[in-house]
Amino acid sequence: MRAQLERDFERFGRDLPRDFAGYVRERYRIDLSARYLGFPLPHPVGKGSGQLSLNQDQLEADRDAGLAFVVLKTVIAEDPAGERSMGAWAVHETRMKVERRRSSAGRESWTVTWKGRGWDRPFEEYLALVRAAAELTRSGALIAVPSVKYHLPALGEPFREAEYRHTTEALARAWGSEPLPLEKDFSPTLAGDRLADEQAQILRWLREVPGQIRAGATGAPPRLALKLMNARHDDDFQLRMLEAARGADALVVFNRLWSVEQAVAYGGYDLSARNLRVLAALRERGLDHPPLTGTGNVSTGQVLLEYARLGCESVQLHTLFQLPLSEYPAVSGSRQQRALHLLFFDPTCGVIAGLLALEAAGELSRVGGELRFLDLCRSAGEKH
Ligand SMILES: Cc1cc2nc3c(=O)[nH]c(=O)nc-3n(C[C@H](O)[C@H](O)[C@H](O)COP(=O)(O)O)c2cc1C
């Protein structure tokens, strides 16, 4: 198997087959099947919301590369008059800087520095992208899901229901079939905002937002993932956030860290270390929670498997799809293909090598002759 993996790493570095998951199942008897927001996936790797999911061309390139799912850029909700309570998040900024980042523990990785925020074009254009995403999803080639930032009130203030209703309805119509899958983004820029100073306020959002979104739909209620921020409070509060968010159908854990000094969001090993620490505490306490999807510095198969072993049934990446070409071991293909190649086939820190090592250590067993990725994610605490 090791020799086979070396050979596959070499040849797939020139050309990764779109259905590499089918190949892995046949050749290695490893079932990479995964899940995101109720969708079955051929493998666990998708693209997180951001500047890499702004248009149909990007979605088609993701489909061709073989990504399992994509979350569209976050749109800012609006009411029937076009008013947006979170309008400050619709910032136009094109410049992104891909930088090395050393974590506080001295580990090198990458981060993307960018001063922009949400979707900065007309809502109508976003609806056109949602129509294209729905078509791709229905074709079975790629799951592509919209993302929204809705009104978040201060304590004592009501939610702006008209904004919730108008936006959810418009997205559901554009999606065209039921139910609408949807991510609600609580972003790092929000974590850095004065609105998020108060813990009680954040907990109220997490408890009440799912009901607000569902109440806004006239047809079947949307299937809803909450993408949680890393609040500027301690790990215990992060666990209280997870508890408060139990009304969602899935949780994306956790968006980037916020640097107060530089006023930018960042990632790297500081981000994955914090996320994994909180997920380990969640597992230790055996708290009940919706299915999890990990995000944050998934830069090797090893990091991916760490998220999986703490319950994440899939992962969402952004930074790894933006590195300089010289950073990937593959010599051709799109960045998405090169990232998949690295994540799955690297003979030392790829997912296949990692799953075989877990089997050798007696930590994962074959079922019906197969090693199954989802077996890693199981825990007593989960609902399903
Ligand atoms: C430039 C940039 C823009 C982003 N925009 C959004 C966004 O609009 N909505 C959102 O939910 N997440 C956004 N993210 C977060 C990513 O989806 C992802 O969760 C995060 O970067 C952690 O993954 P990574 O370490 O692989 O980059 C953005 C990230 C970057 C780097």
Image: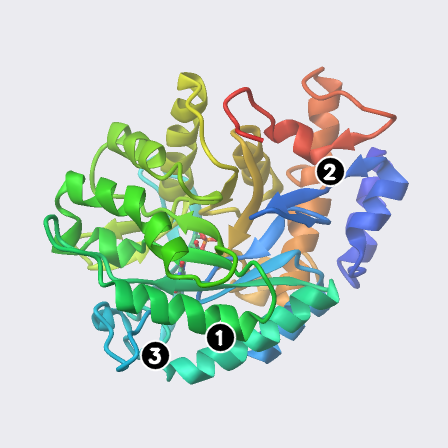
Residue 342 on image: x %, y %:
66, 50
| Amino acid bearing label 1 | Leu
Pointer 3 residue: 120
Label whose residue precedes the other's in the sequence (3 or 1): 1
| Amino acid bearing label 2 | Ile
Residue 63 on image: x %, y %:
69, 67
Say what secondary structure mark 1 lies in.
Answer: loop
The response on whether ligand 1 sits within 8 Å of label 2 is: no
Above or below, 222 against 31 in this view is below
Pointer 1 residue: 54
Q: Quadrant of ligand 1?
A: bottom left
Quadrant that contains the N terminus: top right
Q: Tell me if residue 75 can be seen.
A: no
At 12% across and 54% down in the image, what residue appears? 157
Q: Please tell me how crowded label 3 is: few (under 14), some (14-19), or many (20+) other residues with Cα within 10 Å.
A: some
Q: Is residue 27 left or right of residue 247?
A: right
Say what secondary structure mark 2 lies in.
Answer: helix
Calculate the distance from the C-alpha at mark 2 to the C-alpha at mark 1. 31 Å
Q: Is residue 211 left or right of residue 62?
A: left
Calculate the distance from the C-alpha at mark 3 to the C-alpha at mark 1. 10 Å
Pointer 2 residue: 352
Say what secondary structure mark 3 lies in.
Answer: loop
Q: Tell me if residue 263 can be seen.
A: yes
